[in-house]
Amino acid sequence: MDGSLSDLNTIIKVRGLVNSFGDHVVHDGLDLDVKRGEILGVVGGSGSGKSVLLRSIIGLRKPQAGTIEINGYDQSTMTNDQMQAARREWGVLFQDGALFSALTVAQNIKVPLREYFHMSADLMDDLARSKVTMAGLPLDAACKFPADLSGGMRKRAALARALALDPEILFLDEPTAGLDPIGAAAFDGLIKDLTKSLGITVFLVTHDLDTLYRVCDRVAVLGDKKLLIVAPLEDVTKFDHPWVQEYFGGPRGRAAASLGSGPPKDC
Amino acid sequence: MAEIVYHSDFVCVEQGTPSSLVRFLGSWTIDNAQAIDEVMDATVDAVDCGAVLDCTGISDLDTTGAVLIRRFASNIDDAGAAVLTGVSSEHKGLLDVISCRPPPAATEPEQLPWYIGPVVEVGEAFLRAVASIARLLGFLGLLLTRLFGTLLAPGRIRLVPMIHQVEVIGVNAMGIVGLITFLIGAVMVNQGAIQLAKFGADVFVIDLLGITLLREMAVLLTAIIIAGRSGSAFAAQIGSMRLNEEIDAMRTLGMNPIDVLVLPRLLAMMICLPLLTFYADVMGMAGGVMMAWVQLDIAPANFLVYFHDNVSFDHFLVGMIKAPFFAAIIASGGCYQGLRVSGSADVLGARTTKSVVQSIFLVIVLDALFGVFFTSVGL
C-alpha cells in the first residue's frame, strides 16, 4: 500500500529520463519525484540541463527515453485532448516573462481565460484585475504594454498570467534572474506567500542561492548527467560532492546561508 | 422554517429577519465561474437589504471562486450590509489574498469614440508623415557631412564591410534583377507589337522598348527590387543591433555607427545600383530581342542595327543618372529606419516595413521629378 500512497503524494514523477543533443548527453537516466504542495528548487551548474529538464517536463522537448508522469498521466501516451486539459493545470513563468508584446498586461492575463472558458467581459476584467493586484502590481499597470514595464514588473505580470487559470503546478524558470536584490527578495516573498496560500506545487529552476534558502522546501541538485541529491536544504549542504560543496560552501553560498538562517526579512 | 426565495446549483437564498441568509454551495472554481457569475444578479435581487453569506457549503475554492465571493459580497453590500461567515481555515488564506476589492481600472488601452477616431488618425498620420520626411532629410544631411568628412580622412571608410555589402546587394541580386527585367522586356515587345500592328507600325516596337526600358523601366524595377531586398535588410540588421544594444556598445567603444554601419552600406548601394541598372538594361534588351525574333521574325542582328540607328544614347544616360540618387534614398531610408528601432521586436517589424514603403514611395516621387526635369532640359 506504500506504493500507491506515495503515488498520491507525488505530482510529478520522472523515470529514466535521457536527453541528448547529438553526441552531447545532458541527462542519462534521471529520476525525480516532486511531492504535492512542495516548493522544489532545482540547481546545477551552467549546462547541467536544468532548463532542458524543465522543458522536458512541460512538454516543450521530447526526451530520447524515459517517462514523465504528471498527476499520474504519462505525458508520452496522452492524446492531444488530454494534453490540452492537463496544461490547464500548469502555470509556466518563463525567464523573460514571455508576455505577448502586442497585448496589455490585463489582456495577457485574459488570454488563457478566453482560451479555456467563456466568461462575461465584466467577470474577466475583475479576474484580471485581481490577479494583477495578487501579483503585487499597481492597478495602473493593467493597461500598460509589456515594453513599458520594468523587468521586475514584467516578471510579476508574467506570474499573474501563469496564475490565471489557478494552476495546480507552477513552473518557474529563473524567477529572480535579472532582478535587483530588493526586487528579487520581494519576488521570493511573493512566490512563497502566494503558493502557500493557494496550495500550489512549485518547480523552480534557479541560480539564486537566496531563493533556495528563503523559498524552497526541498532542493534537487543536477550534475554528472543525473540527479545528485534531492533533500531539504540542510541535508544538501552536507552532501559530499565537490560541486555541491563548492556551490554552498563558496563565499556566496555562505553569505546566503547566514542571511537565510537569520530572522526572515519583511517584504 | 425560513422561506427559500431563490435556489440554484451554487447559491441558495433564505428569507429571514432581519437579513437574508445566502448559502454558497458546491465547487466554486474557475470551471464553474461563468455559471456562478450568471446567477449573481438573481441572487442580489432576491436579497432585500443586508445578508449573511455562508461559505460552509463550499467544497472547493480557488482564486477565481474567491473573486466571485468578493463580487457577490460587494454587490449585496451596495443594497445593504453583507457579512461573510463560515469560511473554513484552508480557504481563509485564499480569501485574504483576494479580499480587497480592486477599484475599477482600465484593462484595455484607451480608445477614442468611433466618430472622432478616424479624424484624429488622419491628422496624426499627416503630422507623422511630415515629421518623418523632415527627420529623413536631417539624416541625409548627417550622412552627407560624414561622407564629405571621409574625403579628408579616407581611412575612415571601412573597405571590407563595403565590399561585403557590394556582394550582398549587387552580385547576389543579379539573378532576380536579370530574370525580372528579361521578362519585362519580352512582355513589352509582345504586347507593344500587338497594339502597334493595328497601325502597321510593329517595327516601332524597338523604339518603344528602347525608350521605356532605358529611361524608366530598368532603373525603376531595379530600385524597387533592391529596396525590397536590401533596404529592408538594412533596417532589420541595424534594428536588431539596436535592440541588442550593439549600437550603444559601439558608441562606447568610440566607433561612430554612421561610419561603421551606414556609410559602407550607402557607398556599396551607390556602386551597385548603377551597375545593376546597366545589367537590367542589357537583360531587358535581351528579352526584347528574343521576343521580337520569335514573334515578329526580326533577326537579332537586324534588331540591333535598327536599335543603334534609332534609339538615342540620351535615353540610356537619363536612366543611369537616376540610379545613384535612388541608391542614396534606399540606403539612407533603410539605415535610418533601422537606427530608429527601439523597444520591442514589434517595432523592428514595423520599421522594416516602413523602410520599404518609404523608399519605394520616395523613389517614384523622385523619378517623376526627374522626368519633368529631363524633359525641360531637352534630354
Image (spheres, coloured by chain):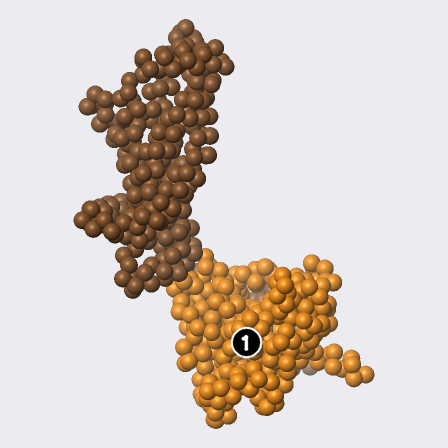
The quarter holding residue A33 reads: bottom right
> Could you tell me which chain the residue with mark 1 belongs to?
A
Q: How many discs mark residues in the rendered view? A: 1
Q: Amino acid at mark 1?
A: Gly
Q: Give the residue drawn at x 31%, y 16%.
A: B311
Q: Give the residue drawn at x 53%, y 85%.
A: A246
Viewer-side residue, B253 vs B193: B253
Vertical position of residue A235 compared to residue A122: above or below: below
Viewer-side residue, A184 vs A208: A208
Q: Give the residue drawn at x 54%, y 76%.
A: A45
- Of all residues, the one furthest to the bottom in this rendering is A262
- Of all residues, the one furthest to the top in this rendering is B200
Q: Quadrant of the N terminus of chain B?
A: bottom right
Residue B317 in view, yes or no: yes
- The residue carrying mark 1 is A45
Vertical position of residue B209 compared to residue B55: above or below: above
Q: Quadrant of the C terminus of chain B?
A: top left
Residue B84 in view, yes or no: no
Residue B296 percent location from the top left of the image: 47, 11
Q: Residues within 10 Å of mark 1 (few under 14, many from 20)?
A: some
User: In the image, is A137 to the left or to the right of B313?
Assistant: right
User: In the image, is B182 to the left or to the right of B19?
Assistant: left
Vertical position of residue A266 compared to residue B330: above or below: below
The quarter holding residue B45 reads: bottom right
In the figure, the shade used to draw chain A is: orange
In the figure, the shade used to draw chain B is: brown
Q: Give the residue drawn at x 61%, y 88%.
A: A240
Residue A98 percent location from the top left of the image: 50, 64
Residue B163 percent location from the top left of the image: 35, 45
